[in-house]
């Protein structure tokens, strides 16, 4: 099986440790991933702000970079959702039948990390060790656009040493929402402040999620509040072993 | 005697103001949480809820896709049943019809059943200009009307008011328009409801003309349906001699049997009950029972505009349950007024631009009033994919500015981002610049994020929207891409 | 062009090229939940309505007990002897307003939702009589109870005016706090008649 990593633009530029964690984790599970150098972004920032025409060359870059792979794995529910549900909209708008056909090929083969682990590799115990009090926030696009369900939870429950605590009102949006965080910054911060409060209420030391953009938002609020909670991507928790402790 | 949404600022500004209203925040958080929990309980009771949603969506979608046929059938059935059918292209025509029928009976007042269509067309204000008083009889509408206020929720227009505020409004304003509130009025909801009963009773008993909307209009039988709780609807639909119903053309369903999934979906989604206290159905005139003169005004007012939109058409399936408002994290925090329309919340954020277009700045701000979390779609009883329509309406906003001589800064930024993301070589250069910035920022940063990573300081320009309240990690010195190159994917 | 023709033209233009064919799946039916009358009684009571179950020969006594000294109005063909009741022959709203109670039959009862539906034929009377008085006593035969909404829809005649009643009038308009009793009858008393008793 040929597997490609779609690291995402945010992780590439801002959170390279998450990408490295995915590589380490999958290698430990016997999967060698490729990193197609032509990849850039899934196009979601443009599409979700209304710039669909502008997203056409970005989506083209995406499908070109990942053509021919059996599976594309990405540590982001949001980017997987974009490839699976939005690329077809962009392709239709381009009027290019070749692009329509190409997105129909890559979209269904694009997996969010927890889906890839549980559904494709069939594992829930990935041999991780993470001796910390952790709470998990299910990000909206993984929860509602992809329907990852309890896969991330099952993966976390199998981690040795972890103390997993329930996040109250977990399924409520954190308020990131892409450009929403800037265009409606006040509302975004009001939502994030409530999420941060729920996180603090758990007494967790680490907030875990499957999307670094959401974590950047909630983590940024928690940091500003000097709340003493750090954020970590699901991949980084699952990649951790006794050697890291 | 009520406020107006005209001249409302764009959503981000209106939201900022609402977010600062602590009483509003508390009222909304309490009310939306209560109704969300109630809905969740009664929906969980229905084993085949998803199948029921599919059936409800299909019934409405089928009706919309053959709307002209169903409207003609409805008109014929209504006429055969003794009703008079009117057609109104827009708000002005609809209001004129209602005023003219009312005046023909020589009266200067009407009693009203809560109706979104009549709120949408500004009927009360139009009648007032004609010297006709329109008395709202739904408790929440009464609170809004007496308080000279604006509705902020589809089901519970006074959701932003708490019991103490309602008491104050009743004491201050009821006497001016009819029977005053008793002096010993308390803020118990039961006592306040009793005061409304006493206040409105005389209006119901003397009314000649009533105005309603309709939740559904059945084409093949000419039946209108009003779903309500308090009995004010039954009063208006039963006691007066004349009934005028203003019905959006999208309310049509093909057959009587089509009501089944909808009457099961609506109360559970809306008030969180197995069934609402009262549902009234009537087909034209029933000799000896109820109004003997029945008018139906079929209203377009932008609906055909929405109907022509291939993505947005589904918004016309809406049965006005307001479940999407109650679960919306944005609505819960800013309330309904910030949307500047009688249709607030997620459905308002798509319905307003679909009905009226995105030419004005306020309407154009609505599709962006969402984090696209998808909670609205999850609860919608007729499966309106609100997030997808929001994204599509954002595209409509952007497209409407494509001819601008001076592009907006956002457009410039998005085009630059798209250019960078269209070629990995460009992205690599951008990341190098960002890595360099990261090195500098990291060295001079005075803030460290939990876990030890350096934070960027406060950013100028659009970035200030982020760093005003949130720390931002400084960019790493090395991008993932550079790490992969340097280490051969971590193998060396 | 008339508004009518203009709107119909706009509708047709809006749907130009849109296929009218939509597969409408049949709505699912609620699974059987045991005895319909028991479920109906339980669900009606959930709305804080009062439910009394009795045998056919007890109905008149039960109704008399429920009414007490209340001044009642009844439809023309109730089929029950209610001593002292006024028979509606076109009372005005004001005349109804001085009645304390009304006794009617119903067309159908819905177990799943605890709903009674009146079609306002002669054993139920005009819509106004079951609306204005503050106490509504509704006599329902167990044989009239159906499982769910679709069963009721199939039985009901849309040409008749229908009133679906699920508990006493209520509002949640103040802080979403449910209060029973607004404009419609503040008390609903359902007398459920068991022919087997």
Image (cartoon, coloured by chain):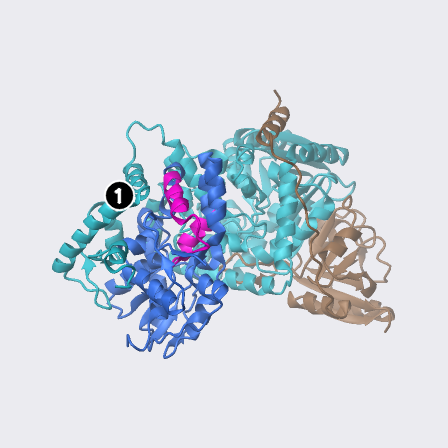
Give the x, y percent position of residue B166: 46, 56
Q: Residue furthest left?
A: B444
Q: Which residue is mark 1?
A: B426
Give the x, y percent position of residue C188: 69, 63
Picture quarter containing residue B30?
bottom left
Nearest the eye: A32 or B182: A32
Whether residue C68 is visible to the viewer of this picture, yes or no, is no
Taking the image as shown, residue A5 lies to the left or right of residue B125, namely: left
Residue A73 against residue B403 in the figure, above or below: below
Residue A158 against residue B266 in the figure, above or below: below
Taking the image as shown, residue B153 lies to the left or right of residue B208, namely: left
Give the x, y percent position of residue A47: 40, 43
Q: Chain in cyan?
A: B
Task: Please report the residue visible at 46 percent of the width from the left and 57 percent of the height from the top.
Answer: B167
Picture quarter containing residue A236?
bottom left
Task: Please report the residue visible at 64 percent of the width from the left and 46 percent of the height from the top.
Answer: B58
Picture quarter containing residue A49?
top left
Please name the color used to draw chain C. Answer: brown
Whether residue A180 is visible to the viewer of this picture, yes or no, is yes
Residue B303 against residue B389 in the figure, above or below: above
Please name the color used to draw chain A. Answer: blue
| Secondary structure category for the residue under label 1 | helix
Magenta residues, dominant SS class: helix
Q: What range is drawn magenta here?
A: A56-85
Q: Residue furthest top?
A: C1
**Magenta segment: does it hold A83?**
yes
Taking the image as shown, residue C129 lies to the left or right of residue C2, namely: right
């Amino acid at each position: 099986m040929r597997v490609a990593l779609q690291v995402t633009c945010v992780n590439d530029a801002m959170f390279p440790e998450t990408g490295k964690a995915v590589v380490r984790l999958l290698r430990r599970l016997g999967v060698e991933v490729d990193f197609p150098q032509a990849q850039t972004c899934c196009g979601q920032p443009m599409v979700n702000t209304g710039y669909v025409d502008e997203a056409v060359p970005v989506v083209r870059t995406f499908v070109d970079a990942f053509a021919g792979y059996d599976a594309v794995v990405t540590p982001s529910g949001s980017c997987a959702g974009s490839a699976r549900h939005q690329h077809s909209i962009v392709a239709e708008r381009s009027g290019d039948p070749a692009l329509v056909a190409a997105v129909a090929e890559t979209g269904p083969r694009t997996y969010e990390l927890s889906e890839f682990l549980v559904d494709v590799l069939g594992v829930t115990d990935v041999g991780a060790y993470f001796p910390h009090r952790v709470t998990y926030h299910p990000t909206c696009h993984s929860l509602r656009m992809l329907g990852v369900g309890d896969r991330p939870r099952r993966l976390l429950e199998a981690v040795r040493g972890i103390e997993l605590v329930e996040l109250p009102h977990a399924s409520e949006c954190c308020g990131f929402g892409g450009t929403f965080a800037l265009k409606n910054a006040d509302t975004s911060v009001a939502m994030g402040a409530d999420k941060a409060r729920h996180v603090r209420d758990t007494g967790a030391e680490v907030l875990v999620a499957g999307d670094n953009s959401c974590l950047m938002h909630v983590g940024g609020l928690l940091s500003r509040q000097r709340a003493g909670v750090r954020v970590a991507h699901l991949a980084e928790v699952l990649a951790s072993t006794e050697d890291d402790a | 005697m009520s406020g107006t949404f005209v001249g409302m600022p764009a959503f981000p500004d209106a939201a900022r103001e609402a977010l600062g209203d602590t009483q509003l925040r508390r009222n909304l958080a309490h009310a939306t949480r209560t109704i969300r929990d109630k809905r969740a309980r009664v929906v969980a009771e229905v084993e085949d809820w998803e199948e029921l949603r599919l059936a409800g969506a299909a019934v409405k979608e089928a009706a919309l896709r053959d709307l002209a046929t169903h409207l003609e059938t409805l008109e014929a059935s209504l006429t055969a049943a003794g009703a008079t059918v009117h057609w109104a292209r827009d708000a002005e025509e609809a209001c004129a019809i209602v005023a003219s029928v009312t005046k023909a009976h020589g009266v200067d007042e009407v009693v009203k059943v809560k109706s979104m269509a009549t709120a949408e067309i500004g009927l009360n204000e139009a009648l007032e200009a004609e010297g006709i008083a329109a008395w709202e009889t739904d408790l929440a509408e009464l609170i809004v009307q007496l308080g000279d206020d604006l509705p902020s929720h589809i089901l519970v227009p006074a959701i932003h008011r708490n019991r103490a505020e309602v008491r104050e409004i009743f004491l201050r304003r009821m006497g001016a328009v009819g029977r005053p509130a008793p002096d010993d009025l308390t803020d118990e909801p039961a006592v306040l409801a009793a005061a409304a009963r006493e206040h409105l009773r005389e209006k119901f008993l003397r009314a000649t003309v009533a105005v309603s909307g309709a939740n559904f209009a059945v084409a093949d039988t000419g039946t209108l349906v009003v779903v309500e709780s308090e009995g004010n609807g039954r009063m208006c639909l039963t006691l007066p001699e004349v009934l005028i119903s203003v019905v959006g053309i999208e309310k049509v369903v093909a057959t009587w049997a089509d009501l089944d999934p909808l009457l099961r979906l609506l109360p559970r989604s809306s008030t969180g009950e197995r069934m609402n206290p009262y549902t009234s159905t009537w087909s034209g005139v029933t000799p000896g029972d109820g109004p003997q003169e029945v008018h139906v005004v079929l209203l377009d007012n932008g609906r055909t505009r929405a109907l022509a939109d291939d993505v947005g058409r589904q918004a016309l399936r809406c049965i006005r349950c307001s479940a999407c408002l109650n679960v919306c994290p944005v609505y819960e925090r800013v309330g309904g007024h910030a949307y500047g329309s009688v249709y607030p919340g997620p459905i308002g954020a798509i319905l307003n631009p679909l009905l009226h277009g995105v030419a004005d700045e306020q309407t154009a701000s609505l599709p962006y009033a969402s984090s696209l979390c998808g909670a609205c779609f999850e609860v919608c009883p007729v499966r309106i994919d609100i997030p997808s329509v929001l994204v599509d309406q954002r595209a409509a906003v952007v497209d409407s500015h494509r001819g601008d001589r001076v592009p907006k800064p956002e457009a410039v930024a998005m085009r630059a981002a798209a250019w960078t993301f269209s070629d990995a070589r460009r992205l690599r250069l951008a990341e190098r610049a960002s890595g360099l910035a990261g090195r500098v920022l990291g060295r001079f940063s005075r803030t460290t994020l939990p876990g030890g990573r350096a934070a960027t300081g406060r950013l100028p320009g659009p970035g200030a929207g982020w760093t005003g309240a949130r720390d931002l990690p400084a960019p790493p010195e090395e991008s993932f891409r550079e790490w992969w190159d340097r280490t051969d994917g971590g193998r060396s | 062009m008339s508004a009518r023709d203009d709107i119909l033209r706009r509708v047709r233009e809006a749907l130009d090229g849109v296929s009218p064919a939509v597969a409408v799946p049949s709505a699912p039916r609620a699974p059987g939940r045991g005895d319909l009358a028991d479920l109906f009684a339980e669900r009606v009571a959930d709305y804080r309505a009062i439910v009394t179950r009795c045998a056919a020969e007890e109905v008149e006594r039960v109704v008399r007990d429920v009414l007490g000294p209340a001044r009642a109005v009844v439809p023309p063909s109730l089929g029950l002897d209610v001593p002292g009741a006024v028979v509606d022959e076109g009372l005005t709203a004001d005349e109804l307003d001085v009645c304390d109670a009304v006794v009617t039959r119903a067309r159908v009862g819905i177990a799943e939702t605890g709903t009674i539906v009146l079609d306002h034929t002669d054993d139920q009377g005009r819509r106004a009589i079951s609306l204005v008085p503050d106490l509504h006593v509704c006599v329902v035969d167990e044989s009239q109870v159906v499982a769910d909404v679709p069963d009721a829809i199939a039985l009901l005649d849309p040409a008749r005016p229908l009133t679906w009643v699920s508990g006493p009038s209520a509002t949640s308009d103040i802080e979403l706090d449910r209060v029973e009793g607004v404009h419609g009858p503040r008390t609903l008393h359902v007398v459920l008649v068991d022919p087997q008793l």
